[in-house]
Image (cartoon, rainbow, N blue to C red):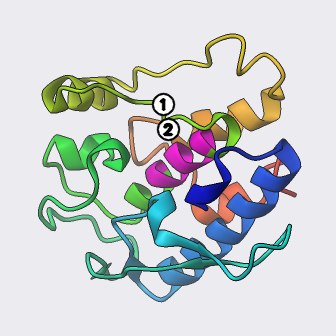
Amino acid sequence: IVAREYYSEADASHCIQQILEAVLHCHQMGVVHRDLKPENLLLASKLKGAAVKLADFGLAIEVEGDQQAWFGFAGTPGYLSPEVLRKDPYGKAVDLWACGVILYILLVGYPPFWDEDQHRLYQQIKAGAYDFPSPEWDTVTPEAKDLINKMLTINPSKRITAAEALKHPWIS
């Protein structure tokens, strides 16, 4: 995934659909990955439309249903969800936050949250302080931005689930 810099909307939609299908499968099995990021997404081949595989389950945890608990601080700084940074109980929604960060990167090639200073980066994430700057985002459809907004929702109980995201008009 990393090697491709950025994707057309059609390619990004196909890619995030496969990621969401894998995340949904994990969540149905009671597994939260906790470290979703481009480096942990592998393409089966270099061909357009190649299958996407989730890798590195080293930080994954098992949860019962929609269980939320403090499972400890785990993940990669730019992909951590606000609830993890607040040390709140968390669950499956952390993976959807990371999917939102990944989708943003797929579309423009850079992350929604960035600062050299980790404390400032974490403040941005906790505030949900991202936007869609010109000119890169000018040609991205409102539907794509809507899905990102639903994934990057600060309140995990209001954040879109993997099953809901797969039914989003931009995906389906």
Outermost residue to the bottom:
29
Q: Residue at x 26, y 75 (%)?
A: 59
Magenta span: 97-105
**Disc 1 marks which residue?**
112
Question: Do the CB atoms of the residues marked 1 and 2 lie less than 8 Å apart?
Answer: yes
Give residue 21's position: percent from left, percent from top.
67, 74
The quadrant the N terminus occupies is bottom right
At label 1, counting other C-alpha atoms closer than 10 Å, the crowd grade (few under 14, some 14-19, many 20 or more) is many
Magenta region includes residue 70: no
> Amino acid type of disc 1?
Pro
Q: Residue at x 13, y 48 (%)?
A: 87
- Tell me: 74 left or right of 51: left
Magenta region includes residue 100: yes
Q: To which quarter of the image does residue 113 belong?
A: top left
> Amino acid type of disc 2?
Leu
**Disc 2 marks which residue?**
152
Q: Residue at x 30, y 71 (%)?
A: 67
User: Is residue 144 placed above or below 51 in the rendered structure?
Assistant: above
Give residue 149's position: percent from left, percent from top.
59, 33
Label 2: which secondary element: loop
Q: To which quarter of the image does residue 71 belong?
A: bottom left
Q: Nearer the viewer, residue 4 or 68?
A: 4
- Tell me: 169 left or right of 81: right
Given this view, does label 1 or label 2 mark the residue nearer the observer? 1
